[in-house]
Image: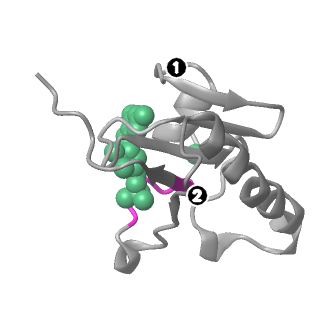
Amino acid sequence: MSDCIFCKIVAGQIPSSKVYENDEVLAFHDIHPFARVHFLLIPKAHVATLADCTSVHEALLGRMLLLAPRLAKEQGLEAGFKTLINTGRGGGQEVFHVHIHVFGGGEPAKRS
Ligand code: 5GP
Ligand code: ZN
């Protein structure tokens, strides 16, 4: 997907603040955090929305969900965190490369 922002982040064409990476997923801080800790967990391979996922993605999605608490804890969210997957225009999705928002820890620090 040549025009996909998140594919460009995966390819290193757009910089990101990385939280975690392995051969199939990437996690990076959201550019407009709505909590003190707010990162996005994405598959490296492009799939537009959760509704476009099929049984092919079943194990990957499972591994992503299991990774979220580990990464959240590593980012300081020991007391818990929220997850969010916006799906489709009606679901408020803005970037059409499936992603899990992981966030928590209260209000984001004010930017100067
Ligand atoms: P959505 O509304 O699609 O669920 O969320 C997309 C998220 O991606 C938003 O929270 C937005 O701040 C974040 N985002 C959009 N473009 C970029 C970018 O270039 N870099 C990073 N790190 N986050 C981005
Ligand atoms: Zn993509």
User: Which residue ends up furthest to the front in the rendered image?
Assistant: 79
Q: Is residue 52 visible?
A: yes
Decide which of 31, 11 is in the foreground and name it: 31
Nearer mark to the viewer, of 2 and 1: 2
Location of residue 65 (image quadrant): bottom right
Q: Residue visible at 52% across and 66% down?
A: 85
Task: Report which residue position mark 1 lands on.
Answer: 13
Q: Position of residue 100 (x, y in %)?
A: 57, 57
Q: Is residue 81 above or below residue 1?
A: below
User: Which residue ends up furthest to the bottom in the rendered image?
Assistant: 90
Left or right of 74: which side holds 96? left
Q: Which amino acid does the dot numbered 1 rest on?
A: Gln
Q: Residue visible at 54% across and 29% down?
A: 9
User: Which residue ends up furthest to the left in the rendered image?
Assistant: 112
Q: Is residue 66 above or below residue 43?
A: below
Decide which of 43, 1 is in the foreground and name it: 43
Q: Earlier in the sequence, mark 2 or mark 1?
A: 1
Q: Is residue 3 visible?
A: no
Q: Residue visible at 83% across and 55% down?
A: 63
Q: Position of residue 79 (x, y in %)?
A: 55, 53
Q: Residue visible at 49% across and 42% down?
A: 39
Q: Does the segment drawn in magenta span residue 112?
A: no
Q: Does the segment drawn in magenta span residue 95?
A: yes
Looking at the rendered image, the quarter that the N terminus falls into is top right
Disc sitting over residue 98 in the figure: 2
